[in-house]
Amino acid sequence: ADFYTKVVNNFYAGISNAEKEVLTDLYHHEVIHRDFFKAAITGATTNVLPTLEFQYPNVNFNDRNSVLATAKALEDTGVAAYNAAGKYITNPTYLVIAGKIVSVEARHASAIRDLINPLTAAFSGDDVVDPVTGLDVAKEPKDVIAAAGGFIKTPFTWKERGIN
């Protein structure tokens, strides 16, 4: 949500109306997802992360390629994180909702990939869909932090949270 807030508050030069619409839709979805999980997690446990601040030192928000490459990395990592997180969700209601959210996140990833490489098979590339199982890849928390941790400014240690 933080990333897309920055994107929609200052669209890159030359952005098409279609790209504005996609990125604005993704912004709205991500805000809803963030707010849902914040409420769900704080309602279910006291073992929560601090409020996170984010940073984007290598992102040029005025450059289409930079914005879309970052969106792709974040969306792909998000889908993989949700896929692995399911086994940690013990509340069946939350698990169903998380399953619905990950399907939306996969659509986000696909939409971004299609903006980058229109009308190609990139939307479901072998880097995100296992060619043997046909399933999206899953990343454990340590792998998610390795992939996206550079965007997180607030220091925290995921190991202290009892998650592998």
Image (tube, rainbow, N blue to C red):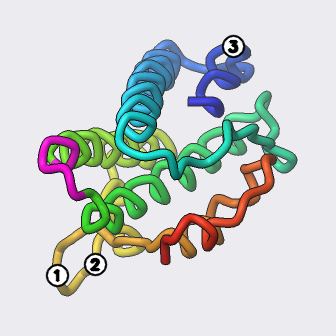
At label 3, the amino acid type is Asn
The alpha-carbon separation of the residues under discs 2 and 3 comes to 35 Å
Residue 25, image quadrant = top left
What residue is pinned by disc 1? 133
At label 1, the amino acid type is Thr
Residue 95 locus on image (x, y percent): 19, 50
Q: How many marks?
A: 3
Residue 108 locus on image (x, y percent): 38, 40
Q: Which residues are magenta?
A: 90-95
Residue sitting at x 42%, y 46%: 45
Residue 137 inside the magenta-drawn segment? no
Element class at badge 2: loop
Residue 130 is marked as: 2
**Seen in the image, is 101 located left or right of residue 161?**
left
At label 2, the amino acid type is Asp
**Seen in the image, is 7 located left or right of residue 88?**
right
Residue 97, image quadrant = top left
Label 1 near label 2: C-beta < 8 Å? yes
Residue 93 inside the magenta-drawn segment? yes
